[in-house]
Image: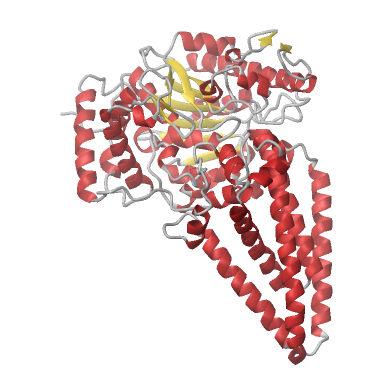
Amino acid sequence: MRDSLERAVPAAALTLATAVVLTIGLELSHAATGASGDPFGHVNALPIGRLALNCLVVWAVVALVQGVTGRFLVTGALSLAAGVVIAFADVSKMRLRDEPVYPTDVSYLRDLGLLLDSAGVDQEVAIVVGALLVGGVAVSLLRRLRSVTRRRLPGRLPSYVARATTAVLAVGALVVAAGFNEPGNALREVYERTDPVWLHWDQPRNYATNGFLAGTLYNLPASPMQRPAGYDEKTMDEIADRYGELASAINAGRNPDALRDTNVVIVLNETFADPSRLPIRMSEDPIPFTRSLMENNTSGSTVASGYGGGTANVEFEVLTGMAQTNFRPQLHTPFQTLLPHHATFPSFVRSLGDGRQTLSVHPFVSTFYRRDAVYPALGFDRSKFRDDMKHTGRISDRGQVSDAATYDEVVAELRAAGEPMLVNVVTMQNHRPYSGLYSDPVAVEGEMSDAERAEIGQYLRGLRHSDQAIEQLVSDLEQMDERTIVLLYGDHLASLWPESVKAAVPEQTLFETPYVVWANFPTRKLDTAPTLGPNFLVNQMLAAADAPITPFNALLAELENEVSAVERTLTLGPDGQQIAAADLPPRALELLEDYQMVQYDLAVGRRYAEAALFDVPPVD
């Protein structure tokens, strides 16, 4: 027993030292991305109490590994390797999307190939290195197991007891840490004594201000929404009745047959934006057709949930009408952390899909953003991913399936269908990486390096191909006998723009992408706010077609009149300009309260009002 205790002291000291090195290393690597200024100055500026807490949390992880392996060299190697992987992922994500790594990002390991491509890492090299690391660890553990089996258990019993105790204590500490965002969490209460400034609306600043480890803890999964005060069945019935009456009043002036026997196509165009809004000079306009389409139809800008990424979050808001900002900050991607846990999830597929075949088309792997589970939950009868598609042509051998091929797949489905369709489309052509994709990049001038200019030119050429594909889609649909209406929107800006370019425009510009409603039959050109949240886009399509709406659409229509966008990135007033939450008028606050109550009921609560809110009221 005495020998075991004598070995335990240096083991504890060594694991603690490893934890300190890992903690400081992660802080330095994150600060080196430019998020926190001088890396060493950042670490020095962190309150000593918070830095100590960070080290203790990491120590629990290292201690758990030590309790399992029983060998410090193996523990040190595994811990340092994990630290390097996390640091690499964080630096890569900050470079690609200007966003720190989150605990929930572990789900991206399902799509390792795309992650490696996006980070510019050769997949074959990564596989070889990974195999060598796994093999080395496996050999070490096998040798350890063989050595243990040769020893007599009684003599080793104190050592096993010490390791088991260490592991149990470490697991207990990590369980407490995992509940960091739940009410009454002991670790959170201790952290709060170090006076952190949680900036949930700006995660890069949140990590930079509070430290990498504190930012990571703050972003651990938590319950999606807090239960609103007064939530019960009676309250939801009252809300459903109120907006049901409003929907009936609106529908009295609309055509109940406006979208009868009509295809509805909703298109998310990957990384589709208007580069003319940025201070650069281009040798040609990459999106001339889309620009003309917007001039002659209901159109405007929509607000991305992030810069350089967040595709699935914009898609979620468009299809459900829900705002991500209503969820707790820790729920970064509903597609990954919320919807897969439900067999069904309320969405506009219920009302738009009534009397239509429902299909989603996404020319990529089915597991990305867990769409294989998400689309059935949203109500789509079928989903076609890259391996299911007949049209999978690419403009470049290194690129993704082209927009043109994706639209060909959609048009083929529409032509083959014996009844109207609701089709949700998510393209992939303009997903990073861009380098070396095209032989004819668009020439661009501005304050940027040669490497930045080359990459931007490639991206702009991809936009031009997208614009041409949209033109062909419109042409194909114009020649069809079936009535078809299209809602087309971009998800976010590309993450390649230099700091000099981003600094020269208002922050709002970095989150705005185009949307347009077009149909092969006459529609109204609406006079709406210049910029709208994605959750309002389906309403624009219905209004342009003069189609009836559901009570939930009526709530959104009322809210849009007061708050044209309510996103984590920014809040916009009815004129499309930024406004502070404290400056919102009383009517806007009342509507937001109803909106949050409805979203809680539909996404987290008992769904008392789902049927009443998502069905179009009968015409008297």
Q: Is residue 270 left or right of residue 156?
A: left
Quarter of the rendering containing residue 347 = top left
Image quadrant containing the C terminus = top left
Residue 333 lies, in percent from the top left, at 52, 43
Residue 438 lies, in percent from the top left, at 76, 21
The reply to whether residue 93 is visible in this rendering is yes
Query: Relative to 486, is 55 above or below?
Result: below
Residue 619 lies, in percent from the top left, at 19, 29
Q: Tell which of 288 and 278 is nearer to you.
A: 278
Query: Relative to 181, is 390 above or below?
Result: above
Q: Is residue 440 left or right of residue 485?
A: right
Q: Tell which of 612 and 105 is nearer to you.
A: 105
Image quadrant containing the N terminus = bottom right
Residue drawn at the location 58% of the way across and 28% of the way down? 409
Residue most toward the bottom? 154
The reply to whether residue 86 is visible in this rendering is no
Q: Tell which of 142 and 229 is nearer to you.
A: 229
Query: Relative to 517, is 363 above or below?
Result: below
